[in-house]
Image (spheres, helix red, strand yellow):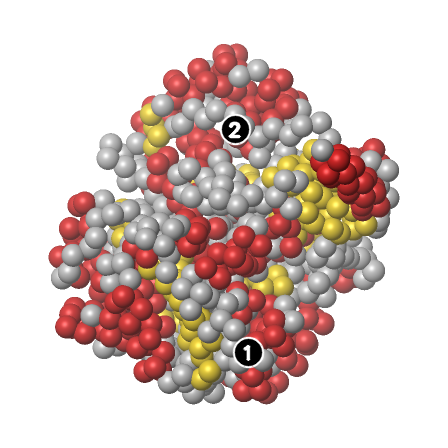
Amino acid sequence: MGKTKHTGPMKLNKKPQPSLWAGMTPMGIGKVKPKHIRDTMKVAWENRDNARYAYRILTEGVCDGCALGVSGLYDQTLKGPHLCTTRLNVLRLNTAPAIDDKWFEDVEQLRKMDSTQLRKLGRIPYPLSRKPGEKRFTRLTWDEALNRIAAKMQAIDPKQLAFYLTARGITNEVYYTAAKVARFLGTNNIDNASRICHSPSKTALKRSLGIGAASCSYKDWIGTDVLIFWGSVAANNQPVSTKYMYAAKKAGTKIIMINPYREPSMEKYWIPSIAESALFGTKIVDDVYQVNIGGDIAFINGVMKHWFEMEEQEKGSAIDHSFVKQHTKGVEQVEVHVGALTWAEIERSSGLSRERIEEFAQLLANSKSGVFIWSMGLTQHRFATDNISQVANLAMLRGFLGREHCGVMPIRGHSGVQGSGEMGADPFVLSGGDFEPRNRERMEKLWGFPIMDWQGDTVGQSLENAHLHEEHERKLKLFYTSGGNFLETMPDPDFMQQTLEKIELRVHQDIILNTSTLVDAKEEVIILPAMTRYEQPGGGTSTSTERMVYFSPEIKGPRIEEARSEWEIYIDLAGRVKPDKKEWIQFKTVADIRAEIAQANPNYDGIQHLTEKGDLFQWGGAWLCEDGVCPTEDGKGQLFAIDLPENRRTEGQFFVTTRRGKQFNSMIYSEVDPFNDGDRYDIFINEEDARKLSIDEGVSVIAYNQYGQLQGRAKFEDVANGNIAVYWPEGNSLLPKGVYESHAKIPEYNSTVIVERADVFHAKKDQKYVENRIADLEMSAD
Ligand code: SF4
């Protein structure tokens, strides 16, 4: 799509610059900050039984942590080593031995453990089965396990079958095979982990710019005028990104954070691989805009409103007219729309003053380049697609697109998340295009079998379909999940438990156990042991946030004897379900899959040549929409006039959002957050708000609403007034079930709550009880 190629890693300017230091205390001694050396020693100790293998994974493999992307210890942005504690923490998933057989004797013993303890038991050793009421798991042969699953698949309507694939270390080849197998089996119910993180990014970028991925590369951060992190805590979730931020600061870039909570990791960071920063820390952000949870649309409307006001004073002072004229449409509607909004409503919804919004608008107007980065703070909303189209509006109006140091970037937290949709493991797309007749026909020709034309369900819808009546054609009867822990990632855990129990057969293809694996199914739970990406014969590929497709080779080392390549399991199973047609779906090696991906998805032409450690290419070139030309029908980007969302809270209510601590997605690595000393059950509240409710720091408080409650301790943090933050997934009990964003169908991960001291809450509960009893007595008297 872009003709300019990425130019490879650049040298980092390491010349000390004391003006960037976080303080004068060497190593930040006494400050609340991650202890990188201690954490690294801990990881070395944990992996001591397989130290050489662990070393080979780090030096030869492609990281299975976040999607920043690194091959061995080197990336494509900066020269020098690239390693972080997130990667080190997940390393044990790859080197752990098999779970001791004794644990499979009693499911109740396992149910007493949380997912962290279950993870520490080790790898799933062989296929297992458990039926409701059975105390122990039964060992199965692969033949027994796959035949049982195949028999069930033959017995149900394909619409009653759904697949899901997480993003944990899964390769493009596995996503592609699963997507093909699902369609071969007659179902379009296949979804992936992006549904609960970045699906709105793709939907919004597609409708605004015709692209489904980051338009620029990380190198564009370094030297851009402004780098905006919008609802994104990259320092915690993609730790090596701090090195890029350091390089950007050295090059004179201004870094801005837009977030309800002043995330400490984005304010100051001690980057271990840079001596100056490891010693004195680095001040990262230059300014923070503490927007309301859900207030981003109003904020951006305010920015655009001010730009049009600036334009009235002086034409060209805010908007890149030549870019807008040549490369976009819809500017007139946006101007009318934001012109009609009052500053009072913008301020109320955004939580920011007009002065602050204008200040930000002017900063962007005075910048010649800018990169917008965002994460869950924008995507996990019921109006997420609109949030992101608003960011695209800003980029288009300023012409920050398709050239050096400019772009839009949904930064991904999981190594598989970019590739999963691009491989077609998604109900709305097939590899290489949307789920529309022309692309379906193209894929039918390539695959040689028909693809059902009905719209598949997203994972949330599929799971809810378990509650449909017995005869319903979409009643979910078989759920096949590769990884994933729905009890801990979806809103309303109690409802999710009932949902999982209602499914007749659940298949968990995974490397470790988690709490969802232990939930009964109506008829049977089958667990299949999968290989990691480093064990997969012939290696595998994954795609980073910046569209870099990395090859990760098979790495010599110990193996879990019965674990199999995930793509092979899918093929084997498909052949058992439709033995007379199994030749339609054969792949002999993983290289055959790459060869077919190159045909299925033209952006991936080149993947077939990746065979060695370090092999990679970036699809689409350095910039999508290069020179402003978007891959839309008329080559233009679409500006959208976006209404303020319904995001009200009544007097006394707080907006609540969820945040991450020391964790890799739902896997928790420490009960204590290294950046603020927070406990997983802390409720972050502004001191001023807390005082009004007579809440002291550290007291037991309850956040509650109609969906559930969360008991924790009040922690005074710099959160925007009227907003609180809780950890994810602990706070999921406060979230509504069944509320989805209308375009991308991501569940709503925000809500409103009342916060009370626990003693007040419980006293009121007692009072309600007494009142109820009186009502009961009156009823009996009648
Ligand atoms: S920043 Fe992400 S890609 Fe880089 S080492 Fe850490 S987890 Fe892996």
In this rendered view, identify the residue nearer to me: 294 or 215: 294
Q: Is residue 29 visible?
A: yes
Name the element at disc 2: loop
The residue that appears at 23% across and 77% down in the rendered structure is: 588
The residue that appears at 44% across and 71% down in the rendered structure is: 525
Q: Position of residue 406 (x, y in %)?
A: 45, 41
The residue sitting at the front extreme is 782
The residue that appears at 46% across and 18% down in the rendered structure is: 337
Q: Position of residue 571 (x, y in %)?
A: 27, 72
Q: Tell me the quarter of the picture where residue 43 sits.
A: bottom right
Instruction: Classify residue 32 as left or right of residue 241.
Output: right
In the picture of the structure, the residue carrying the numbered disc 2 is: 645
The residue sitting at the top extreme is 313
Q: Which is more foreground, mark 2 or mark 1?
A: 1
Say which mark, if any, is on residue 135: 1
Q: Tell me the quarter of the picture where residue 779 sits.
A: top right
Q: Position of residue 312 (x, y in %)?
A: 49, 12
Q: Is residue 229 visible?
A: no
**Neighbourhood count class around disc 1 (C-alpha, 10 Å): few under 14, some 14–19, many 20 upward:** some
Q: Earlier in the sequence, mark 2 or mark 1?
A: 1
User: Mark 2 belongs to which amino acid?
Assistant: Pro
**Neighbourhood count class around disc 2 (C-alpha, 10 Å): few under 14, some 14–19, many 20 upward:** some
Name the element at disc 1: loop
The residue that appears at 37% across and 26% down in the rendered structure is: 324
In this rendered view, identify the residue nearer to me: 370 or 595: 595
Instruction: Classify residue 555 as left or right of residue 257.
Output: left
Is residue 119 positioned above or below 274 on the image?
A: below
Find the distance from the CA under tag 2 to the CA under tag 1: 49 Å
Quadrant that contains the C terminus: top right
Q: Position of residue 427 (x, y in %)?
A: 32, 51
